Image (cartoon, grey):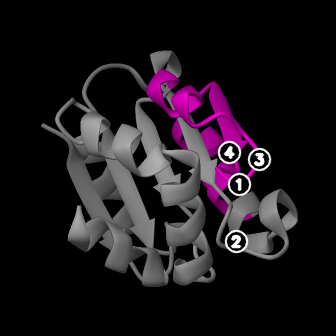
Amino acid sequence: MSKILLTSNGFFTDVIKQHFLQLIKGHLASKKATIITTASQQKQTNKFAIKAKEDLLRMGFNQVDFTDVEFDKPDSLENYDVIYINGGNPFYLLYHLKKSGADSILKKLAKQDIVFVGVVLEQLFLDKT
C-alpha cells in the first residue's frame, strides 16, 4: 500500500522532511525518486521543482529525475520508489495524466509500497485516486 504526503509548500520545513523520511523504508541511497513537472509551465526549470530535487538529493537519494507525462513514457513511473507531484495547473496535469495513461499507472502504483508527495493543488488529483 502506498503512502501519501500532502503539503502546501514541498519540503519547506524540517518537520515535513521528517514526516516524509518516516514514510521511506530502507536506505535512501538505494531509492529512486521522480518529480512530475507537467503542471508547471517551466517544467524542470521551475524553481520549486529544482528545490525539491536538491532537497531529495540532500536527504540522501542518489537518483532524482524529472518526468513530464505530457512527453515522457508514463510506464517510466514504475521505476521509482518516490513520486513527487510538483505544483502548477492541476487541470493541465490531470488532462495529460489521462491522455498519456499515466493515471492508470499511478492507480496501479498506489497499491504498492510507493511514496507519493503531492504539492499544492495536485492534492486534488491524489485525493480522487
Mark 3 surroundings: few (<14), some (14-19) or many (≥20) residues within 10 A: few
Query: Tag 2 or tag 1, which sits nearer the N-term?
Result: 2
Question: Foreground residue, 111 or 28?
Answer: 111
Secondary structure beneath dot 3 equals loop
Tag on residue 70? 1
Q: Which residue is mark 2?
A: 48
Look at label 2 and name its amino acid.
Phe
Position in image of residue 82 (x %, y %): 43, 39
Say which quarter of the image contains residue 41.
Answer: bottom right
Q: Tell me the CA gap for discs 2 and 4.
A: 14 Å
In magenta, the rendered stretch is 51-79
Q: Quadrant of the N terminus?
A: top left
Q: Which circle, 1 or 2, is nearer the viewer?
A: 1
Look at label 3 and name its amino acid.
Phe
Q: Which circle, 1 or 4, is nearer the viewer?
A: 1
Q: Tell me the CA gap for discs 3 and 2.
A: 20 Å
Say which quarter of the image contains residue 14.
Answer: bottom left
Residue 108, compared with residue 118, is above or below; it is above
